[in-house]
Amino acid sequence: MKIITIAIFLNFFLISKVLALIEVDITRGNLDPLPVAVSPLHVDINSEEYKDLRVKELGEEISKIIEINFKNTGLFNPLKKDAFVQKPDIAHLKPRFEDWRLIKAQALVTGKLLIKDQKLKVEFRLWDLAAAKEMTALAFTTTPSNWRRVAHIISDKIYERLTGEEGYFDTRIIYVAESGPKNQRVKKLAIMDQDGSNTKYLTLGNELVLTPRFNPTNQMVTYMSYFRNMPRVYLLDIETGTQEIVGNFPGMTFAPRFSPDGKKIIMSFAKDGNSDIYTMDIETRIVERITEHSSIDTSPSFSPDGKFIAFNSDRSGLQQLYVMRSDGSNVKRITFGKGIYGTPVWSPRGDLIAFTKMHKGRFYIGVMRTDGTGERLLTENYYQEAPSWSPNGRVLVFYRETKAGEKGEGFSAKLWSIDITGYNERKLSTKTDASDPSWSSLLSK
Amino acid sequence: MNLGEKMTLKTNLKNILLVIFTTLILSACSTAKKSADIEGDVYTGKETVEYLASGVPDRVFFATNKSSLTTASRATLRKQATFLRKNKNLNVTIEGHADERGTREYNLALGERRANAARDYLMTYGISGKRISVISYGKEKPVNPKSSPVAWSQNRRAVTVKVN
């Protein structure tokens, strides 16, 4: 699989440091989404043709992607374009603020683009309509085939300016694409942009594959495969397509994740009915045993500073969550609530652990502080598990399955996301049934 | 309408009633049978079970989240051990499985633990560990795709499979 690496030349030409009057409160969720007008980007009439791109429509298309990104956050309310009062090129120079205020917009995004010498030049501006001021502006150049990423990068910059937090739009999600009847499921590794476009399949479906996870520092992936009927953890470079088995374990390895520096893989190794947690350094191949207990120890997840590991163990009798130092010392149980707990995942900000909770036949996705206090259940359903964090720690993506009938009919598995406030639950669009999502870090970071 | 016709009608009605009645009893029986197929959360029925040889069931069942062997499971495994002692050149894989009502990763570990519980028991009855490999499929290969307690109990299993 060849993924084109691109150089995006960020070229700040104007940043107004004025105190913005509009601000998006992201601590509360989407009670009052901010009305935003996203003007189509003006396409410079000197633009040249490029391959099969519909250049004339590119400005409109980019603005649509930005609108969908905004709408999906639940924090913004993109206004209908038919109410727009100014042409894109004129608005981009200097909007008539009072006219845009009439349609109840509080922020306005304008921009223009030019394709020349096989390059796409884009600039955009974000306007605070109440204060009648430019909030941020940015210009950059890239290859025209990256136009969708351009829309995501613009979305990220605006999100950052309005919320004070890093965006998560120029990212991808790796997951397991599922097809076929429930008792003969075919599973393939798949990757898509965070908005569901550009789906690519990374394996053919000949063997069972599970739990892909991104390296937080690059585009490497670790996952579990039953290749040759030997369930083992693999390392996959999605740019070159090369893959290798991780370590030389005489039994099943599973539940892999990267360390926050991307240098180690942490996973479970099962032998003689007992699963313990191990790490392997990808470069030196040195394997370390982290837990040594007769219970099941699995689903390990590092804290972002690398100092701690959250994991799942049934050493108390049933599945509970534990935290220990990264050398395996100082093991502490953190869940004591009703029900049983699985899949702890440390937030990239370090302040929360996301988990799956099972109680009275229902499944919950929730978050708690890293000492187990402050448990908040975000969503309840028949079956759901495996939360994965957006790189800014605002949104969780997970998968949900439905109940099956006599012959397995009615069964489906889909990806869903929810804001950590518990608001804005929504189904992600995937080409097939899907499970085990993992969110990448920002591509253009 | 003559008497003969009346009689036929009566008999027909009787037959129909009989059929309905029998159907009711049978369906009641099958419902009763289904709930009787689970004891303390462990499947005890014959559906889905295959045989390594005549009278030698290929699988044992488990309670939710458990990997301990029931009395019935031990009896099954002793039959498997006898069969394996008689067939000295035969090797087996024990496939451990979980139901769909748990997290994927924990279920992989649980399936491995169940398969090993069965393996350990065979070994205590004199079967060499070298002849028995294990593999866990977690919740990935349900034998019954339905979302119901009976299906889940059938899916919580360790299955002994001949490899040669």
Image: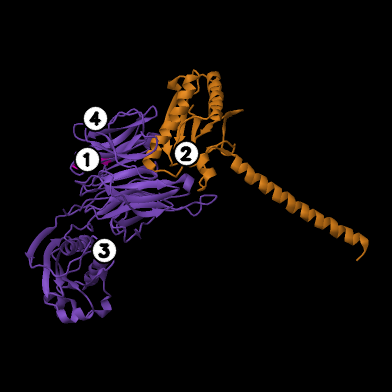
Q: Are marks 2 and 1 on the same chain?
A: no
Using residue A194 as the reference point, say whether residue B123 is left or right of it. Answer: right
Residue A121's spot in the image, x, y percent? Answer: 14, 65
Sequence-first disc among 1 and 4: 1
User: Do marks 1 and 4 share a chain?
Assistant: yes
* Camera sees residue B101: yes
The residue to which callout 4 is attached is A288
Which chain is drawn using orange?
B
In contact (CB < 8 Å): disc 1 and disc 4: no
User: What is the crowding at mark 3: few (fewer than 14 residues within 10 Å), some, or many (at least 20)?
Assistant: many
Element type at marker 2?
loop
Which residue in the structure is indicated by mark 1? A259
Q: By what rule are the colours in the image chosen?
A: by chain
Q: Position of residue A352 (x, y in %)?
A: 25, 48
B93 or A295: nearer the viewer:
A295
Give the quadrant of residue A308.
top left
- Return the chain for callout 2: B
Q: Position of residue B74 (x, y in %)?
A: 53, 26
Q: Which amino acid, by three-letter code, is at mark 2?
A: Thr
Residue carrying label 3 = A69
User: Separation of disc 1 and disc 4 at Cα?
Assistant: 13 Å
Residues tagged 2 and 1 counted as in contact (Cβ below 8 A): no
**Other residues around mark 2 within 10 Å, as few (<14) / some (14–19) / many (≥20):** some
| Residue stretch rendered in magenta on the structure | A257-261
Chain letter of the residue beneath label 3 in the structure image? A
| Callouts 4 and 2 in the same chain | no
Residue A416 in percent (x, y) is at: 35, 56
Q: Which chain is purple?
A: A
**Which residue is painted at 29% across and 36% down in the image?**
A267
Q: Secondary structure at mark 4?
A: strand
